[in-house]
Structure formats: C-alpha cells, structure tokens
Amino acid sequence: MNLLKQLKASLVLGWLNGIIPIKRTPFWVISYLMFPLSLLFLLRLYSEELVAFAVLGGFLSIFAYTGIEVLGDVVYFKTVCKIQDMFVASPVSPSAYLFGLALSSLFYSFPGFLLLILISYFYGPLLPKHFPKLLLVLLLVWISFTSLGFTLSTFIREPRHAWPLVGILSILFSVLPPLYYPAALIPPVIRPLSLLIPTGSGAIILQQETGLLHFPKGFVRLAWFSLVLQTFLLWAIARYGSRWREN
C-alpha cells in the first residue's frame, strides 16, 4: 500500500472519528477547553503577570491532551468496536492507523487553538514572528504524546482502565512541568529535570522565544534537543515496539 493510500486511509479515519462526532456532539470541543480556560481564569484573578504563561500553557496542554487521548480511543476501538482487527487485516500500517486517530483528536482541539490565538492577541505574549516556532513545538508535543498514548493503549484491555489513565497523565504532564508558571521558579539545580517531559521542554522553549524569561543559550538548545529526541524515541517505540496485533 503506497504512501498516498496510507495518507488517504488516515484522513478517512480522522474524518470518521473527528469531524462527524463533532457535528453530532459539539460538547467534545468544550471538554478540550475546560482545563486550560479554567486555569487561565484563576491565574487572571491571581496575577495579570501569569496570564501570558497561562496562554502558553494552554497551547501545550491542549496538544498534550489531544495526543494522550488517543489512548482511550484505541482501547475502545480495539476491545468494544473491534475496528482495530479490521485494520490489522487490511494493508493499513500502524503508523497510518495511529495518524488517523491522532488527526481526529486534533480536529477536536482546533477550535481551542483558535480561541487561544484570539486571547493571546489581547493578553500576549505571542506575536506573528513567534508562530513558526510555536507550531513546531506544538507539532512535536502532539506527536510525542500521541505516540505515548498509542503505545500504552496496546497494553490495556479494558476501556474503564484507559479513561482514568488519560486524565491522570494529562494532568501530570500539564501541571508538574512549568506550563502555567515561570520555569525560573524551579531551582536551577533541578531545572533540567523539567526537560525530561516533552511539555516541559516545550514550555522552556516558548517562554524563552516569547521573551517572558531568559535562559542560557545552552539550556535552550538542550531543551530543543530533548524535545526532538523524546519525540523520535516515543514515535519509534509506538511504531516498532507496541503490540499492533493481539496475541
């Protein structure tokens, strides 16, 4: 099955699991917005200085949740709908199947992305010159967490175990790293630990790029290296190490 057909299969799956459900149940879009908008509201009440960090954190957390949410979809399709069995028997590759499910989740988050763009217009810190690196960071975060979600999903057999894990991981990867607070608050000795999570590396990069904080150039390069490396490793594990076929 050539690359063009694999891409077409991914787009069809993304449409069926993304666009159509949004039309039928728009509340899915709202659910993706509740967490970042709630924190943005609370931080706005506490300090206007934190609003800019909350906007950047909102971008990162939406795309991280979009990726990790694939975990629940895969388990549901595998155990309840038995759709994955159909794809296993077809020429569709695991990468095309994964990309299709990830694309469907991305459709859910797109309205939230546009809303945060609008909010950043009034509160900062984003300028047009920041968008290329913002999009690159979000793409890497999305790929890394999508890959992680897919890998974990292939080892879970019950949907009731998958959905709580999605919530736990999304909160851990959004709250513990410096997404909604300045990375400068982390003591310099342990600050490199934030780079062990893709969202932490992304937060360092975006806080530096937008001028909210200033880090040593070597530390920012390390953040880029960490984000790219984690994305590649997580994708490679999802592609070659996950259980595509059930025993």
Image (spheres, rainbow, N blue to C red):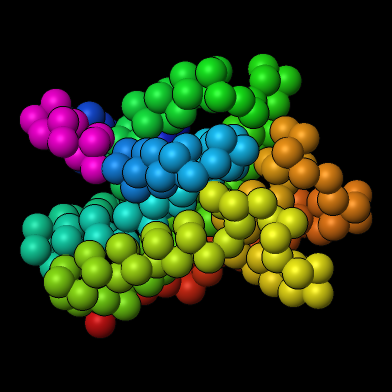
Q: Horizontal placement of 78 versus 80: left or right?
A: right
Residue under the point 59% across and 47% down: 140
How many marks the image carries: the answer is 0
Q: Position of residue 86 (x, y in %)?
A: 18, 56
- Quadrant of residue 136 within the rendered picture: top right
Visible residue check, residue 185:
yes
Q: Position of residue 180 (x, y in %)?
A: 54, 50
Instruction: For the N terminus, give its image quadrant.
Output: top left
* Residue, far front: 46
Q: Position of residue 51 (x, y in %)?
A: 54, 37
Q: Dominant secondary structure of the magenta stretch?
A: helix
Q: Horizontal placement of 176 versus 42: left or right?
A: right
In terms of depth relative to the viewer, which is nearer, 94 or 115? 115
Residue under the point 91% across and 49% down: 217
Q: Position of residue 162 (x, y in %)?
A: 24, 69
In terms of depth relative to the viewer, which is nearer, 10 or 21? 21
Instruction: For the C terminus, give its image quadrant.
Output: bottom left
Asked if residue 242 is positioned above or below residue 16 in the image, the reply reads below
Q: Magenta stretch containing residue 201, yes or no?
A: no
In terms of depth relative to the viewer, which is nearer, 48 or 181? 48
Residue under the point 11% across and 34% down: 25
- Quadrant of residue 211 within the rendered picture: top right
Residue under the point 53% across and 56% down: 144
Q: Magenta stretch containing residue 25, yes or no?
A: yes
What's the magenta region?
Answer: 22-31
Asked if residue 198 is positioned above or below residue 125 in the image, the reply reads below
Asked if residue 132 is positioned above or below residue 83 in the image, the reply reads above
Visible residue check, residue 85:
no
- Quadrant of residue 243 within the rendered picture: bottom left
